[in-house]
Amino acid sequence: MLTRWLVFHVASGQSFFTGAACLIVAVGLSALARRPYLRILRNTLVFYGVTLIFLSATPLPPWFEILLVLASLSWVAGEAFRGRLPARVVLGLRVAVAILWAGAMLVEGPYHLAPTVPQLGRPILGIIGDSVTAGTNQSKVKTWPGVFANRHDVVVHDHSLAGANVASALRQANSVSSDELLVLLEIGGNDILGETTPAKFEAGLATLLSAVRRPGRVLVMLELPLPPTYNAYGRIQRRLARQYNALLVPKRVLLGVLQQQGMTVDSIHLSQAGHQNMANAIWAVLQGAYDEKPRRSR
């Protein structure tokens, strides 16, 4: 249970906030670090803070990452040579590091909030996805788009295809009709798990978003959970989401389904229970687009 929670905490990016908080507390403890046990506590917090931040693969802007690293290293050096530096310099380093990490939390925070989808009446939902949506040819499994459509009495066009990546999904985009005013993109996992370079990922995703964007259509995209050191893919996805006005769904939504016991058959592909829960999770994000009562033909 603890392992499952820890994996979710890290993969969802929430560990970034825990790690940043550890560093801020460590800075505060520095003023009392003449006591040995407080120095040990401070150093422990720094170690765990840096580890949690690294594992979170949080895609901050590169210039901000460099600034955070340089400021933090300067602070550590300042504490090591505190006896040789003016007290105001050491204090300035502490204040600067605390402010920068607090600012980083404020910058990252909005990406962990669910987007507000505008009301569109009873829009036809188009889905571009990979095997998380399309399934793995399990004959008795009803995939979540079908569950979503039946449960909420809405029209869903599922264009997803097992094995799809951002480049091959362009074929899916070309099959999206003009009356699909709400389009959800669950795509990119195969790029992360495969051999797609960041440059090819950016080119493919930009082409895909350009193909599906049109006046009056709302695009919603699931943010990708990232392994450590894969920050570049997250930066690309966030930048292109802003560029093409796509609403970005926090990665915790998908992970909240995948990390529950019994929701997958292989830790990635959904079981029948997983498809049921995925339909619930997507409805929680998209329900603002729909009227409260379905329009049934008489």
Image (tube, rainbow, N blue to C red):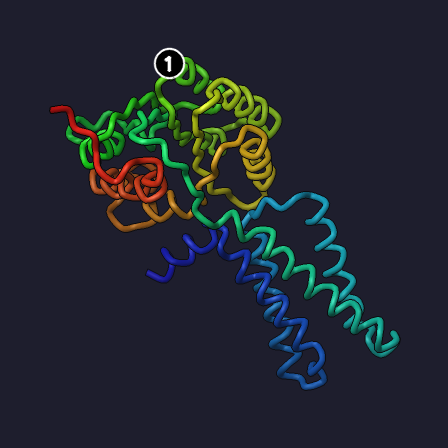
**Percent position of residue 46, x then y:** 63, 66
**Percent position of residue 217, x then y:** 43, 25
Q: Residue at x 42, y 18 (%)?
A: 173
**Quarter of the N terminus within the rendering:** bottom left
167 to the left or right of 65: left
50 to the left or right of 97: left
Residue nearer the viewer, 140 or 144 = 144
147 to the left or right of 107: left
Which corner quadrant of the image does residue 174 belong to?
Answer: top left
**Quarter of the C terminus within the rendering:** top left
- Structural crowding at the residue carrying mark 1, measured as other residues with C-alpha within 10 Å and reported as few (<14), some (14–19) or many (≥20): few
Would you name the residue on which mark 1 appears? 175
Residue nearer the viewer, 38 or 203 = 203
Which corner quadrant of the image does residue 273 belong to?
Answer: top left
Q: Residue at x 64, y 72 (%)?
A: 26
63 to the left or right of 288: right
Q: Secondary structure at mark 1?
A: loop
**Percent position of residue 285, x then y:** 36, 42
Which corner quadrant of the image does residue 216 belong to?
Answer: top left
Q: Residue at x 27, y 50 (%)?
A: 261
In the figure, 253 relative to 95: above or below?
above
Question: Residue furthest toward the bottom?
Answer: 35
In the figure, 207 relative to 74: above or below?
above
**Percent position of residue 243, x then y:** 59, 30
In the figure, 258 relative to 130: above or below?
below
Residue nearer the viewer, 111 or 71 = 111
Q: Amino acid at mark 1?
A: Ser
